Image (cartoon, grey):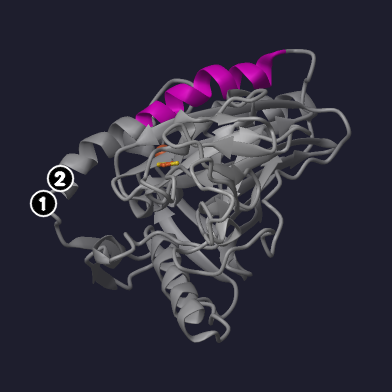
Amino acid sequence: MTQRLIMAEISSPALTNADGGMLWDFWYPALRSHQVRGRDLRRAMLLDVPLVIGRDARGKPFALRDVCPHRGMPLSCGQSDGETVECSYHGWRFDARTGQCREIPSITADSKLRVDRIYAGSFPCEERDGYIWAYMTAPNSPRLEHAPIPAPELPKFSERYSTAHLSAEMPVHVDHGVIGLMDPAHGPFVHQSWWWRKRRSIHEKHKQFEPIPSGFRMSAHTPSSNSLPYKVLKMITGAPVTTTIDFTLPSYRFEQVRAGNLWFSSRAVVTPVRRDLCRLDFCAAWNVLRYVPIVGFIVEVLGPRFIAQDTDTMTKQSVGLKSNPHLMLIDDADRPAKWYFQLKAAHLESQRTGTPAPHPMDGPVTLHWRS
Ligand code: FES
Ligand SMILES: [Fe+2]
């Protein structure tokens, strides 16, 4: 029971930063794998940076800044031969992986111009779980050919499984996308439906959270029995169902539901596209009833409806946010949102000073709310 009426006013500080309050030096999904085939050059945008994504001769993806360093032509207007990308304006060619300039057709043999000193911006790029990911190094930081960490991978717990992907745009800053995703209190109001829950099912909950590196975990618990998908899982396995939810910077949410040797694993990334637009990139894998399409139905049919309830809400919220209102985070329902802002601030400070980021949580804590 929480009688502590601690209220914190925050004024969404991230929105006013010069860099748009987005976190650099992390992996973000730029495109789905199937969107880039053969010699295609496709546009994407992450953290307000225009990208051109293609594949090299071996099919490995690459990501360059979609701006020719000569006169700013989008490189996506040019063409790729699998090794280099040629700008459509004056035909300069750039190494697809490093961005290094390989050829300037207009220079003569006696030119002193050091072509190899010219670079188009490039970003480490990997393919994982059906997405092409780019590691977004901060502007003006040294060029990186390889990221210091691999792109995040969706955990899977058996050899055979089914998968699904969903995505939805939200016209709000990534911070609002993230705290909207972790906010437990909107459920009974936004997600009312016969298959998820009813507004009158609101009741008091206690959930334990613990610190993990760069994030926090909602410790393994038996999920809310008032939602249909969990009832189905319990019914078909007969085993106790447990779920664990991890949030880590920059904006990753991993959820694992286990019941006996059956599992369902999902990852949601709130991807910052521009400072006023983010995208939810959700993917899931499961081995529950792989041959009966019930889980597929829940994820692919009910999932988009569920996500649409969130995106519709955020679209409406974005109207109110235009006037840059002061915002409030209350205990305990908004405590995860507070941790997010604290983790983010600690991370930015540690990037600035080169010292380790302190964790906002001292240890496990139980939060109480009604939802
Ligand atoms: S603008 Fe790209 S080659 Fe001139
Ligand atoms: Fe929601």
Relative vertical location of residue 204 with respect to residue 299 in this rendering, above or below? below
Say whether marks 1 and 2 touch (CB < 8 Å).
yes
Quarter holding the C terminus is: top left
The image quadrant of residue 338 is bottom left
The amino acid at mark 2 is: Gly
Q: Quadrant of ligand 1?
A: top left
- The mark found on residue 323 in the picture is 1
For the N terminus, which image quadrant? bottom left
| Residue ID at (58%, 48%) | 134
Q: Regarding mark 2 in the picture, which secondary structure is present there? A: helix
Does the magenta portion include 155? no
Residue ID at (54%, 78%) = 359
The residue drawn where x is 28% and y is 66% is 18
Image position, residue 239 (x, y; %): 79, 36
Q: Name the residue furthest left.
A: 323
The CA distance from mark 1 to mark 2 is 6 Å
The numbered dot on residue 320 is: 2
In the image, residue 271 above or below residue 336: above
Type of residue at label 1? Ser
Residue 113: horizontal and vertical position, in percent?
52, 60
Q: Which residues are drawn in magenta?
A: 293-309
